[in-house]
Amino acid sequence: MSHRTRTAIALATIYVVWGSTYLGIRVLVETVPPLLGIAGRFLAAAVLLGTLVAFRRGRGGLSARPAELAGAALVGTLLLAVGIGLVAIAEERVDSGLAALVLASVPLWVVALLVAEGRRVGRRGALGVAIGLVGVAILVSPSGAEAPPAWAVLLLLVAAAGTAVGSVASSRVPQPPDPLLGAVVQMGVAGAVLLAAAVLHGEAGRLDPAVVSGRSLLAFLYLVVLGSVVAYSAFVWLLTHAPVATVSTYAYVNPVVAVLLGWVVLDERLTARVLVGALVVVGAVATIVRRPATARPLTADAGAVRSPP
């Protein structure tokens, strides 16, 4: 198989699979408490991916310096526990497409953080952030009786902000040299944090295996195997075999996939407001992520190329 074919397959994998994880979360939380379900997903994925790393590289492949483990734990808490955990709670009441579009704004928040630190991002970056924030405002603005609850929208915004902070932190704190090992630590810690939060929130008492639907169970397995293990492995391969600008394209392809799947599979409404907001946000993210061939993406310097739901 040629390098071009492998790259195309890996890109298609992260485009479709990561784009579909919002749909998977929405189906999962239909009959499974959100924090408990996502905690189980990350813990199971950490075990599977850790086993894969140990099989390929031996027990030494699971070792790292304490500072690297601590850095990965911090990033996992921000990116996965805060980012995906809050998304799961919000998706009990909001469409998966809306959740994906709000989380698609993460590169905008990353650039905003860089500006707050005094970094120069140029006119293109500043314009992308300004346009993107307008798009987010369109998406989350109240619209009639079917508008999502304000608390759910707030959770999505906090999830996006937390993910942005985690993305920036990922390039500032020590990380295991092996990205797969880093993912194992991130998912394991995130799963433990979410499990503790689920117990404190009383979700353990809400879980009734008798009412867990078959499709929620299938969604859980899909999120574990394809969403976390297969797609992340493809992502890591791409980072070492394809230009960062090419890999970064998932940031504005995933939300399009998520919106279309939500519409087709779950019959989520595609209102004019959602379509306009989607076009504005995706266009703004594309403006920021895609740079001339001689430059790296603005957000790549901040570690914004990261694992979504």
Image (tube, helix red, strand yellow):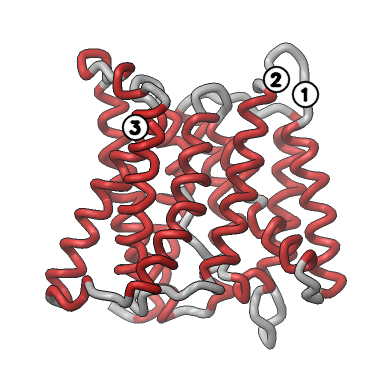
Q: Position of residue 23 (x, y in %)?
A: 45, 35
Answer above or below: position of 308 versus 268: below
Q: Position of residue 244 (x, y in %)?
A: 54, 76
Kindly identify the residue that appears in the image at 30 percent across and 17 percent down: 205
Q: Is residue 6 visible?
A: no
Answer above or below: position of 149 versus 260: above
Which residue in the structure is indicated by mark 3? 36
**Sequence order check, earlier mark of 2 and 1:** 1
Q: CA distance from mark 3 to mark 1?
A: 30 Å
Tell me the SS state at disc 1.
loop
Q: For residue 184, what is the image quadrant? A: bottom left
Answer above or below: position of 88 versus 252: above
**Left or right of residue 124, residue 91 in this image:** left
Kindly identify the residue that appears in the image at 70 percent across and 56 percent down: 109
Q: Are marks 2 and 1 in contact (CB under 8 Å)?
A: yes
Which residue in the structure is indicated by mark 2? 147
**Left or right of residue 122, residue 278 in this image:** left
Pick the residue in front: 30 or 67: 67
Q: Position of residue 182 (x, y in %)?
A: 35, 67
Q: Position of residue 32 (x, y in %)?
A: 34, 24
Q: For residue 203, what is the image quadrant? A: top left
The image quadrant where one finds the N terminus is bottom left
Report the disc number at residue 240: none
Tell me the SS state at disc 2.
loop
Q: CA distance from mark 2 to mark 1?
A: 5 Å
Three-letter code for the amino acid on which mark 1 is drawn: Pro
Kindly identify the residue that appears in the image at 72 percent across and 49 percent down: 281
Tell me the SS state at disc 3.
helix
Q: Are marks 3 and 1 in contact (CB under 8 Å)?
A: no
Answer above or below: position of 204 versus 129: above
Report the disc number at residue 142: 1
**Left or right of residue 259, residue 111 in this image:** right
